[in-house]
Image (tube, coloured by chain):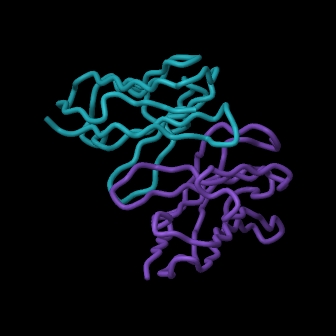
Amino acid sequence: QVQLVESGGGVVQPGRSLRLSCAASGFTFSSYGMHWVRQAPGKGLEWVAVMSYDGSSKYYADSVKGRFTISRDNPKNTLHLQMNSLRDEDTAVYYCAKDLSYFSRDHFYGMDVWGQGTTVTVSS
Amino acid sequence: IQLTQSPSSLSASVGDRVTITCRASQAIRSYLAWYQQEPGKAPKLLIYAASTLQSGVPSRFSGSGSGTDFTLTISSLQPEDFATYYCQQLNSYPTLTFGGGTKVEIK
């Protein structure tokens, strides 16, 4: 079945780095755009980043631009989020999600498959 | 682009008709999606392109609107619909903003 499984979360000190991964299965990963979305404790959803199916387009929320990097390894069906210079306010559950867009470089339509999330806690 | 959802919360009974609105600070054509999130779970896509029902979603859910004003309607609220609902704009980059959410509670 279609599935996304995140990993790599944990407790990290402010200023340090963490790399999240998302393993995809059950669909042709290399054909779809992929997102990262986060949710701080007790708060709403915050979109973080998106990458097109081939990696040629990527966009970031202002809150993470310059600190986070989204990437993908299509042969390994894996999405990554490299998070540097972490701050207290980056504490959240991080979800990866598949976009509806098929072979689209420049437009995305909504996230139809979500992982279970991985928790990142930034604390000294 | 800012998305303002209203109300932020509502109480309703099973069988009620419920309408949630999402207003964009700038026109976003029809690039709007709606999600449902139950506590402790990942969000679920309900509607995309403002009015297209995602496969497998019950027909009591419907979406409408374009430009700046959008609505999500649940025609007859069911027990499993008590959750938080979010809109998201996918028209204006780089930030694909979510609305603040609407919590639907049991009256």
Q: Is residue A1 visible?
A: no
Judge whether B65 appears above or below A49 on screen: above
Q: Front-most of B32 and B36?
A: B32
Q: Front-most of A15 and A116?
A: A15
**Residue found 30% across the figure and 40% down from its top:** B103
Q: From the image, state the color of chain B.
A: cyan
Task: Say left or right for A32 vs B100.
Answer: right
Which x, y percent locates residue B87?
48, 35
Which x, y percent locates residue B32?
57, 30
Q: From the image, state the color of chain A.
A: purple
Q: Is residue B62 visible?
A: yes
Residue A6 figure quarter: bottom right
Which x, y percent locates residue A108?
70, 39
**Residue found 49% across the figure and 18% down from its top:** B69
Judge whether A72 appears above or below B49 on screen: below
Task: Say left or right for A13 vs B6.
Answer: right
In this view, which residue lies farthest toward the left?
Answer: B107
**Residue found 67% across the figure and 65% down from its top:** A67
Task: Say left or right for B77 vs B98.
Answer: left
The quarter of the rendered structure image containing the N terminus of chain B is top right
Which x, y percent locates residue B76?
28, 25
**Residue found 71% across the figure and 56% down from its top:** A27
Residue A15 figure quarter: bottom right
Count of all numbered marks drawn on residues in the image = 0
The quarter of the rendered structure image containing the C terminus of chain B is top left
